[in-house]
Amino acid sequence: MRLSILAVGILVAIWAPAVRADLFELKEGGEVDGAVVQRSESGDYVVRTSEGAEISLERNSIQRIVQRDDATAEYRRKSRSTPDTVEAHRELAEWCRARKMLEQADHHLARVAELDPNDEDARRSLGLRQVGNRWLTSDEVMTERGMIFFDGKYRTKQDAALRDRDKKQSSVNVDWLQQLKQWRGFLDNRRPERVQEGQAHILAINDPQAALALIRVMEEEEEDAVFEFFLRVLAQLDHPAALQQLVAYTLDPEINPEFRAQARDYLLRWPRPVPIVPYVNALKSKNNRVVNLAGLALGQLNDPAAISPLIDALVTTHTRVLNPGNGGGGGDQITAGFGTPGAGGGGGLSMGGNAPKTIKEDYNNERVHQALMKLSGKQNFEYDEPAWRAWYVDMQMRQTVNARRDQ
C-alpha cells in the first residue's frame, strides 16, 4: 500500500469536486475518512481528509468504500474534537438526536452515564429503568420477571415452551402428512409389490405423533377397505387425538356400522381407562340415534359412574318433521336407531294445510335401558325413571352405610 501527500499532477487523473466525505476501509486494516478529489484512469483515488491533507490510495489497497452523507461526515469531525466530559457528550448526543442519528446519540449518552453514575436523565434516555438501586435494560427487567423473548415478544417460560412444542408438532404433522399421502398413493399402484410396500409402511407406524396426520388422511378417504385399514393403525397409536377420534367414530350415526363396532372394540382394549364424559354429554344429544349409541358404548365400558346420567336419558324428547301427505309417518327420520316413541308422545305444531308438520315426541331409548340393566346387576324397572332413581338412591345409601361399618 502506498500512502503519500501529493503535489498537483503526480497522477494522470480525472478531476472531480469534493461532494461528500466517504469512509475508505483498507485491506491491511485502518480506514481513511475524506472526500474524493481525484480518481485516476487506473482506479486510484486522491482523498482530502477533514484536516485538509490529500492522500493517495491505490485501488488494490481498498477493501470497500462506505458512502456517507454530510451529517455523518460532520458527526465524525465533531466526535474527534469533543472533550471527554459529561456536558460535551450530552451536547453531541442532542445534536445526533436532532438528525435522527440514534445509534450515535446512544453511544454518547452511555458515555455520560459512565462519567456520571448519578445522571438519571442519561440512563432514562437510554431506555434504562431503575429497579431498586440498579439501572436495567428492558431485556434485563423482563429477565428479572422470569420472562423470555420468544417468537417476537416476551412470554412466560411456560407459554414459550408450549408454543415451541406446538411449532415442533406442526412440523412433525407436516412431515407425517406428506409421508402418509405418499404411502396412500402406493395402495392404488398397479404393481402388487408397491401396494405391499405401502401397507407395510403404514402398518409399521408406531409413533404417536403420527395420529393427527393419520386422522386428516382418514377424513379424505373414500374407500371403505382403506379406511378400515387406517382405523386399525390409528388404534395402535397411544395419543389423545387417536382416543378422541375413536370415541367420535363410535358416536357417528352416519358412518358404516362396522366401523363404529370396530372403534368400540379398539376402545375396550385401550391401554388406559376410557373417559365416559364424551358419552355422558352425548346422552343429551338432539339426535336420538346418538343418544342410543352413547348408551351402547357406556354399557360396554362398564363404568358405574354412568348409571345416574343413563337414568336421566332413559326417555328423551326429540323433534321431528312430518312431510305433508305422509299420514304422520313418512317424514320420521329420527326413529331409525334404537329409540322408539313412548306411549305418551308429545303434541305437534302444524305449519299450515299442506306444510310440513313439526312434532315433539318422547322416545324410550333401548340401548340406554340395556346399559342400565348391565351396570345395575340386571335390575329392570323398564322405562320408569322415578323407579330407577329410587333404586339408585337406595343403593348409594346402603353403600355409604356399609362403608361406615367397615371403618
Image (cartoon, rainbow, N blue to C red):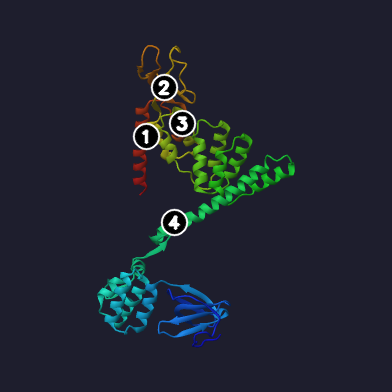
Would you name the residue on which mark 4 appears? 162
Q: Residues within 10 Å of mark 2 (few under 14, many from 20)?
A: some
Above/below status of 231 relative to 291: below
Q: Residues within 10 Å of mark 1 (few under 14, many from 20)?
A: some
Residue 142 left/right relative to 298: left
Above/below status of 178 relative to 358: below
Would you name the residue on which mark 2 appears? 320
Q: Residue furthest front?
A: 9
Above/below status of 67 relative to 190: below
**Amino acid under label 3?**
Val
Q: Earlier in the sequence, mark 2 or mark 1?
A: 2
- SS at circle 3: helix
* Residue 41 appearing in the image: yes
Question: Depth-wise, is mark 1 or mark 4 nearer the camera?
Answer: 4
**Amino acid under label 1?**
Tyr
Distance between the alpha carbons at the discs numbered 2 and 4? 46 Å
Residue at point 62%, 40% (across, down): 229
**Amino acid under label 4?**
Leu
Q: Earlier in the sequence, mark 3 or mark 4?
A: 4
Would you name the residue on which mark 1 appears? 392
Distance between the alpha carbons at the discs numbered 2 and 3? 15 Å
- Label ID, residue 297: none
Would you name the residue on which mark 3 appears? 290
**Amino acid under label 2?**
Arg
- SS at circle 1: helix
Question: Depth-wise, is mark 3 or mark 1 nearer the camera?
Answer: 3
Question: Depth-wise, is mark 2 or mark 4 nearer the camera?
Answer: 4
Q: Residues within 10 Å of mark 4 (few under 14, many from 20)?
A: few
- SS at circle 2: strand
